[in-house]
Image (cartoon, rainbow, N blue to C red):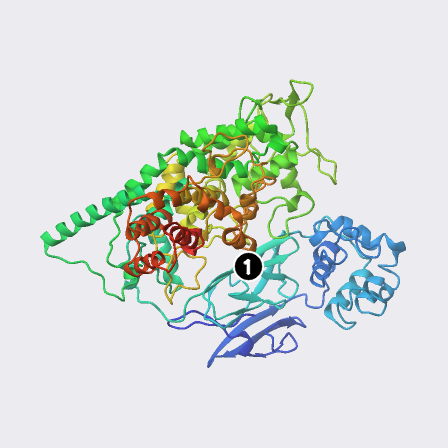
């Protein structure tokens, strides 16, 4: 039983541990101090629950109390063995098992496990004549040596249950026995204060309508243990930190989730959110979530920060000094016109210093929203847009010369960039890849099937890339955190069973991909031919002679598909915001819920309604106050990493950083086999050994996962920028920026301003200008040395290396 205190205001509180329980008839029901009611006889009774100064009475009616329910292996024994750790990968479920006894991982194959337990080992593991002499009981209680230690005691409920099952003949399961259909957890959602406890209750539902309390047999895990952790007993403890946690509950392959929200203890008045800037529908949804957590957002960033941020995010390119000056002048003109209109109305609009929207780095500069919108349009029309997003998708689609051979990689890379240049609708983009046929040296999409040459490889990639569902685990066993099983994995792979390829040259350099008329995928354990079926969907009818992939593409890109649009909007949101609404972006599952489900749904529906237009999606996100927020935190939101109360600072991608260094120093990187002037975001050959890109985490293009790109900092990276010849060669180059500035007529003040515009896309403050000018007046310093020192320091600064 759960005992919950419901106050007039404030979140509910669990009082189960503090409650007292009294049965009116202990011959019918007995209740322990843990709140667990145990039936001991037929009849009726009342359980009196006293807690928090209140009394509640729970009626209980028991029938057939003395009739023992027949046990079976699938419904009764598997949960016990799972709970005691036998099915862990470190125990008997590891590859090859332990001491000759092997079980399936997480009990995904009960029939095989039953055979191993009951029929193998010369029948010693289960002794039906003398149950107490069964090795299953003797080892688990340490009556016989056991490498896994004691799992339960002789007088425990687990021991008695196993012993009774063996005495009943150790049955597997009769056809008439009920089958588990789902599990529920209570509470499914709960707002909790910091440093509180909450007992969970788990109920299993069976095909015959019966229910069982399986709280003591379920397994628990938290996706954010720093916010809320859950023990083996199903008791949740919140920490002092604000945020949300999804608590996974697993029982016999079924999964349920309890969502725990821990807001800041000091409530924020509702009008604090009503007056915040709203630039489109996304902001209302973000603010709604922030209000649930009592988080206040930082204010909007200044125009210079927005220019740099949007340029890096949308086209992977740092603004030049000239572009920065032009944009800031445009913003100043807009702000002046706005102030004039305000003055004519006789109204001021200065925000109070303590207003949440007033917290911006440069309070004197008001955001020029119209100029920002025009900037985004200009960026999306530049050629760098197609290069940058083409590079991003080349990483995901394995445009790797080692897999595709050079010409195939070049053609696929070109097709991707041209698709973004034409703003091809995303559903069309995916459909052309899925249904691709033709010559790999002439057309890009067929190379997808050269990189992923087997049906399982293609199925895994399609699911992860375009549905955000990782089916890898289901290739060998039931997914430990989801409903997917091997049937789902191999049914999806069956769509690609008839994809054929042939070489048009003896050397095999040139492949032709085409749909064949035969080919099947079989289940590795049952040897059954798997019919094509999408994961979680109904198999669409495939007319005779039609390419199976056409049916898959139709299902995949349908507006009602629950995964397709949600996956790409979360992925795109992550690239602009620093964190996906689902994170990782390609791991959608019930145990990894979205941080803001209404936001994800609204963004996906809007994307579909506008024809899967990727540029529209980018414009929508970039226009929101959420994207335009300052990266400077407040004491209120400093710990938030999930809810977009401030902009999440992150390191520039390796390719963008390399191009940016080349741009500000005037000495770009050259790439063997590529025309002079080729930028890193335009380079198609991922095999080229470029030390800088490897040090800073360029993807190797071996998997379709965003996780291949490493964004963490390292000592090696800092040494590469501070001490290696890479930077020094660019500062000492005769044709670089240093030489140009040295020979120019610019005064030190003008040089410093020029460098700030180039590196940081802003003008220096008076303090910065004064400090930088001092570099030119040091004793025995040359003009060139002063410029080199300034550029070296700025290049190694966090403001340059990070997107903020």
Q: Nearer the viewer, residue 443 or 140?
A: 443
Q: Nearer the viewer, residue 183 or 512?
A: 512
Q: Quadrant of residue 90?
A: bottom right
Q: Is residue 444 left or right of residue 612?
A: right
**In the rendering, at what x and y percent does residue 638 appear?**
41, 64
The N terminus sits in image quarter = bottom right
In the displayed structure, 371 sits above or below 188; it is above
In the displayed structure, 17 sits above or below 282; it is below
**In the rendering, at what x and y percent does residue 516 appear?**
64, 22
In this view, the residue farthest toward the front is 780
**In the rendering, at what x and y percent does residue 617 appear?**
38, 41
Q: Which residue is mark 1?
A: 223
Secondary structure of the residue carrying numbered label 1: loop
Q: Residue at x 87, y 65 (%)?
A: 133
Q: Is residue 168 left or right of residue 773?
A: right
**In the rendering, at what x and y percent does residue 394 appear?**
52, 36
Residue 208 seen from this side: no
Q: Nearer the viewer, residue 533 or 372?
A: 372
Q: Is residue 72 left or right of residue 493?
A: right
């Amino acid at each position: 039983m759960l005992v919950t205190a419901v106050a007039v205001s404030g979140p509910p509180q669990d009082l189960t541990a503090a409650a007292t329980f009294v049965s009116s008839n202990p011959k019918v029901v007995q209740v322990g101090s843990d709140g667990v009611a145990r039936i001991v006889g037929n009849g009726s009774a009342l359980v009196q629950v006293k807690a928090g100064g209140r009394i509640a009475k729970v009626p209980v009616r028991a029938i057939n109390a003395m009739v023992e329910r027949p046990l079976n292996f699938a419904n009764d024994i598997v949960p016990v063995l799972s709970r005691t750790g036998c099915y862990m990968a470190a125990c008997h479920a590891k590859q090859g098992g332990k001491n000759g006894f092997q079980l399936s991982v997480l009990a995904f194959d009960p029939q095989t496990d039953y055979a191993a337990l009951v029929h193998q080992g010369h029948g010693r593991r289960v002794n039906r004549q003398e149950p107490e002499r069964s090795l299953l009981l003797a080892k688990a209680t340490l009556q016989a040596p056991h490498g896994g230690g004691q799992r339960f005691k002789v007088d425990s409920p687990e021991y008695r249950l196993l012993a009774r099952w063996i005495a009943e003949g150790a049955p597997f399961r009769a056809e008439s026995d009920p089958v588990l259909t789902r599990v529920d957890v209570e509470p499914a959602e709960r707002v909790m204060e910091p440093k509180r406890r909450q007992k969970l209750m788990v109920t299993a539902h069976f095909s015959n309508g019966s229910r069982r309390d399986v709280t003591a047999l379920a397994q628990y895990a938290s996706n954010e243990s720093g916010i809320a952790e859950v023990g083996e007993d199903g008791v949740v403890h919140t920490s002092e930190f604000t945020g949300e946690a999804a608590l996974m509950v697993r029982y016999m392959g079924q999964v349920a989730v309890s969502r725990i929200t821990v807001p800041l203890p000091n409530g924020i008045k509702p009008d604090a959110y009503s007056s915040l800037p709203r630039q489109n529908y996304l902001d209302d949804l973000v603010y709604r979530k922030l209000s649930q957590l009592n988080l206040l957002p930082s204010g909007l960033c200044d125009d210079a920060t927005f220019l740099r941020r949007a340029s890096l995010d949308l086209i992977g390119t740092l603004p030049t000094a000239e572009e920065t000056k032009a944009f800031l002048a445009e913003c100043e003109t807009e702000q002046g016109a706005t102030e004039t209109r305000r003055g004519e109305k006789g109204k001021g609009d200065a925000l109070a210093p303590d207003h949440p929207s007033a917290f911006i780095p440069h309070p004197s500069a008001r955001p020029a929203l119209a100029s920002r919108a025009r900037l985004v349009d200009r960026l999306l029309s530049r050629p760098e847009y197609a290069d940058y997003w083409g590079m991003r998708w080349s990483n995901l689609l394995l445009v790797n010369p080692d897999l595709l051979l050079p010409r195939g990689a070049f053609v696929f890379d070109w097709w991707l960039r041209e698709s973004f240049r034409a703003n091809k609708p995303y559903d069309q983009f995916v459909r052309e890849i899925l249904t691709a046929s033709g010559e790999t040296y002439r057309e890009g999409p067929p190379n997808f099937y050269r990189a992923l040459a087997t049906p399982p490889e293609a199925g895994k990639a399609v699911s992860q890339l375009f549905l955000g569902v990782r089916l890898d685990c289901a290739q060998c066993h039931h997914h430990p955190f989801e409903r997917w099983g091997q049937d789902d994995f191999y049914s999806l792979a069956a769509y690609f069973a008839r994809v054929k390829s042939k070489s048009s040259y003896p050397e095999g350099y040139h492949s032709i991909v085409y749909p064949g008329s035969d080919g099947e995928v079989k289940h590795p354990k049952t040897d059954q031919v798997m019919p094509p079926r999408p994961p979680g969907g109904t198999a669409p009818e495939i007319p005779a002679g039609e390419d199976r992939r056409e049916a898959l593409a139709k299902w995949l890109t349908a507006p009602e598909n629950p995964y397709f649009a949600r996956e790409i909007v979360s992925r795109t949101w992550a690239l602009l915001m620093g964190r996906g609404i689902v994170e990782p972006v390609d791991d959608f599952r019930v145990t990894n819920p979205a941080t803001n489900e209404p936001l994800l749904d609204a963004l996906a529906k809007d994307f579909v309604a506008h024809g899967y237009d990727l540029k529209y999606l980018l414009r929508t996100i970039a226009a929101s106050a959420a994207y335009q927020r300052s990266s400077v935190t407040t004491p209120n939101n400093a710990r938030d990493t999930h809810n977009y109360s401030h902009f999440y600072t992150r390191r520039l991608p390796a390719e963008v950083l390399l191009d940016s260094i080349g741009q500000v120093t005037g000495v770009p990187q050259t790439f063997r086999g590529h025309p002079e002037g080729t930028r890193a975001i335009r380079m198609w050959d991922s095999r080229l050994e470029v030390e800088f890109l490897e040090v800073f985490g360029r993807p190797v293009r071996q998997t379709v996962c965003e996780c291949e790109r490493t964004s963490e900092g390292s000592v090696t990276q800092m040494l590469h920028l501070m001490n290696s010849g890479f930077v020094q060669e660019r500062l000492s180059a005769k044709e670089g920026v240093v030489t140009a500035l040295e020979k120019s007529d610019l005064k030190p003040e003008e040089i410093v301003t020029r460098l700030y515009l180039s590196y940081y896309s802003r003008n220096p403050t008076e303090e910065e200008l004064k400090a930088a000018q001092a570099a030119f007046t040091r004793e025995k310093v040359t003009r060139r040395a002063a410029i080199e020192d300034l550029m070296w320091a700025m290049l190694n600064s966090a403001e340059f290396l990070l997107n903020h």
